[in-house]
Image (spheres, rainbow, N blue to C red):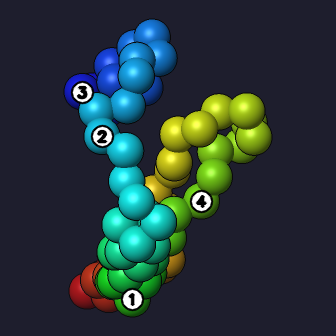
Amino acid sequence: MALEAAAMAPAAPPAAVLSGEETRRLQDSVLNIVELLERSGIRLDAAADERDQSLVLKSLRRPRKKKIKAGK
């Protein structure tokens, strides 16, 4: 909910300006987090509407099959 509010807030000047090296480190950190999520079975996909900047989390795990008890 807070992320949605932040995304809807009017554009403000950046809180900080990153150097080229800091930007690369931040990008590497984000890529590492995405990699860890994917290894855990969570994939990040862009939303259906390409203009929409939000991300959708999708699990790669298959739903469990329900066990059927044999009737007596």
Which residue lies under the disc numbered 2? 16
Residue 72 % position (x, y): 25, 86
Q: CA distance from mark 1 to mark 4?
A: 15 Å
* Image-based side of 58 in relation to 14, left or right: right
Amino acid residing under circle 4 = Asp
* Image-based side of 1 in relation to 43, left or right: left
The crowding category of the residue bearing disc 1, from other C-alpha atoms within 10 Å (few below 14, some 14 to 19, many at least 20), is few
User: Does residue 44 lie above or below 17 as drawn?
Assistant: below
**Residue 29 or residue 63, whichever sits in front:** 29
Q: CA distance from mark 3 to mark 2?
A: 20 Å
Instruction: Determine if residue 61 is in view.
Output: no
Which residue lies under the disc numbered 4? 45
Q: Secondary structure at mark 1?
A: helix
Q: CA distance from mark 4 to mark 3?
A: 20 Å
Q: Residue at x 73, y 33 (%)?
A: 51
Mark with earlier residue (4, 2): 2
Amino acid residing under circle 2 = Ala
Mark with earlier residue (1, 2): 2
Q: Quadrant of residue 34?
A: bottom left
Give the quadrant of the N terminus: top left
Q: Nearer the viewer, mark 1 or mark 2?
A: 2
Which residue lies under the disc numbered 1? 39
Q: Secondary structure at mark 2?
A: loop
Question: Residue placed farthest to the front in the image?
Answer: 19
